[in-house]
Amino acid sequence: QVQLVESGGGLVQAGGSLRLSCVASRSILSAYSMGWYRQAPGAAREYVAGIGEDGSTNYPDSVKGRFTISRDIAKDTMYLQINNLKPEDTGVYYCFAIDGAGDHWGQGTQVTVPS
């Protein structure tokens, strides 16, 4: 079973940028899709970006233009670039991967943007 480990979170002032990383324990070529969710305190988990097997990307309107998902297949790593951070971006960011064995999740990385 693939294991995912996120990193790159932190405390950043509004307007700043962060790049989150998600390292997989084995090749991500087998993943049908990968992506990121986030969860703000007291809120449901929210989808923020996805990347398909063919490299196509998808974002909800709420983050389009500020979030960019990418992957480095050689490094088995997926990234989430977040620009122009806003207080409402605060939350725990989780990466996921879906393959033939089902869906897999990382433990999350905290992003805090003070208001």
Image: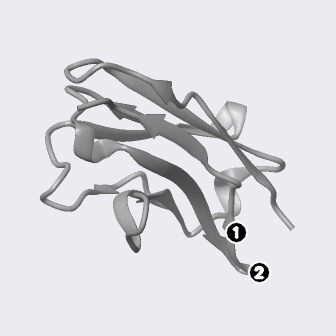
Local SS, label 2 = loop
Q: Where is residue 94 in the image (x, y as percent from the top left)?
A: 56, 55
Crowd around label 1: few <14 · some 14–19 · many ≥20 (10 Å):
some
Residue 104: give its label: 1
Q: How many labels does the image show?
A: 2
Name the residue rendered at 57%, 54% in the picture: 95
Three-letter amino acid code of the residue under disc 1: His
Crowd around label 2: few <14 · some 14–19 · many ≥20 (10 Å):
few
Name the residue rendered at 63%, 64% in the picture: 31
Name the residue rendered at 34%, 55% in the picture: 56
Tag 1 near tag 2, CB within 8 Å: yes
Quadrant of the rendered structure where residue 3 is? bottom right
Q: Position of residue 17 (x, y in %)?
A: 32, 21
Q: How far apart are marks 1 and 2 (CA)?
A: 9 Å
Local SS, label 1 = strand
Three-letter amino acid code of the residue under disc 2: Ala
Which residue is identified by label 2? 101
Quadrant of the rendered structure where residue 81 is? top left
In the figure, is residue 12 to the left or right of 26?
left
Front one among 66 and 1? 66
Q: In this view, does 111 lie above or below 10?
A: below
| In this view, the mark in front (1 or 2) | 1
Quadrant of the rendered structure where residue 11 is? top left
Q: Where is residue 74 in the image (x, y as percent from the top left)?
A: 69, 33
Q: Which quarter of the rendering shows the N terminus?
A: bottom right
Residue 87: give its label: none
Q: In this view, does 44 lie above or below 26?
A: below
